[in-house]
Image (tube, rainbow, N blue to C red):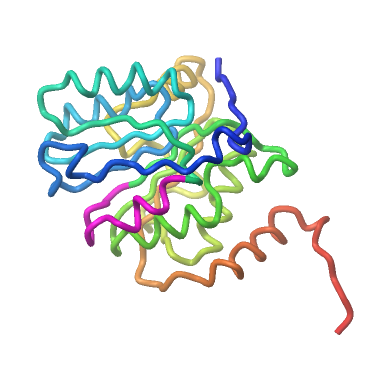
Amino acid sequence: MRQHVNPLSRFFQLPLQLPSPGELFDHPEQPIHLDIGCARGRCILGLAELNPGWNHLGVEIRRPLVTAADRDALNTASGNVRVLFCNANISLETWLAALPDDRLQRVSVQFPDPWFKRRHRKRRVLQPALLLAIAAALQPGRELFLQSDVLAVIEPMVALTELSGCFTRPESDARPWRADNPLAVPTEREQYVLEKSLPVYRVLYRRNASPLPDPEALESRWQELDNPAETVFTDV
């Protein structure tokens, strides 16, 4: 069962200074996979074991899950995986901006908390500012992977990502949803859903060469698209 926390509560609005790659990993020069909302970290821990030539960072807003997951990460021999507590929309942007060029090579957002009602849209993990921070940190060709078992959750993520103009789907991928997971290790939620023979909605994007859009313009267009009933039209 998913245990929601409200990311807009005062406690989660406090920005945290996240450790640099040099503080987190034994070999900080390796490419980084960032998993946003990693829960107990089973996926990111498994990927780190399979891919020792990459560094793997999970971030999660539910502190008890982080405590257990990072304990396991620190006990690994390869020194290439960590799990940190933070509100991604408050603390990740500064960390992403400080990364060396092309250090971040993959970002995943998998089965985020299902804040699917429009009145809860500010609680969703993938907000315009965070998406632009991710796009700024990824070089062309690097990956953004999204998946959920709730259509009303993934559809706004897909709409926002495509609205930004910064990402392109591989031509060979099935539409509207990719048939398989490009990551070799499923999340706990994915395992549960698949065991129930329920659908999983997946989209893989690659950063293209388009410049970042104006943040205020993207936010405004996103607001109009996501909740057109709130759009105010005035006569010119």
| 187 within the magenta span | no
Residue reaching furthest right?
235
Number of marks in the rendered image:
0
Please identify the quadrant where the N terminus is shown.
top right
Q: Residue at x 17, y 44 (%)?
A: 22
| 99 within the magenta span | yes
How far from the left and from the top, in percent, is residue 10? 61, 36
- In screen coordinates, is 71 left or right of 94? left
How far from the left and from the top, in percent, is residue 40? 38, 21
When the figure is inspected, residue 202 is found, relative to residue 46, above or below; the finding is: below
Q: Residue at x 34, y 42 (%)?
A: 18
Write down the quadrant of residue 24 in the picture. top left
When the figure is inspected, residue 19 is found, relative to residue 215, above or below; the finding is: above
When the figure is inspected, residue 37 is found, relative to residue 69, above or below; the finding is: below
- In screen coordinates, is 202 left or right of 180? right
Q: Which residues are magenta?
A: 91-106
The front one of 234 and 161 is 234
Please identify the quadrant where the C terminus is shown.
bottom right
- In screen coordinates, is 56 left or right of 208? left
- In screen coordinates, is 27 left or right of 229? left
How far from the left and from the top, in percent, is residue 206? 35, 57
The front one of 175 and 141 is 141
Write down the quadrant of residue 72 in the picture. top left
How far from the left and from the top, in percent, is residue 89? 50, 46
Q: Residue at x 41, y 73 (%)?
A: 211
When the figure is inspected, residue 192 is found, relative to residue 102, above or below; the finding is: above
Residue reaching furthest bottom?
236
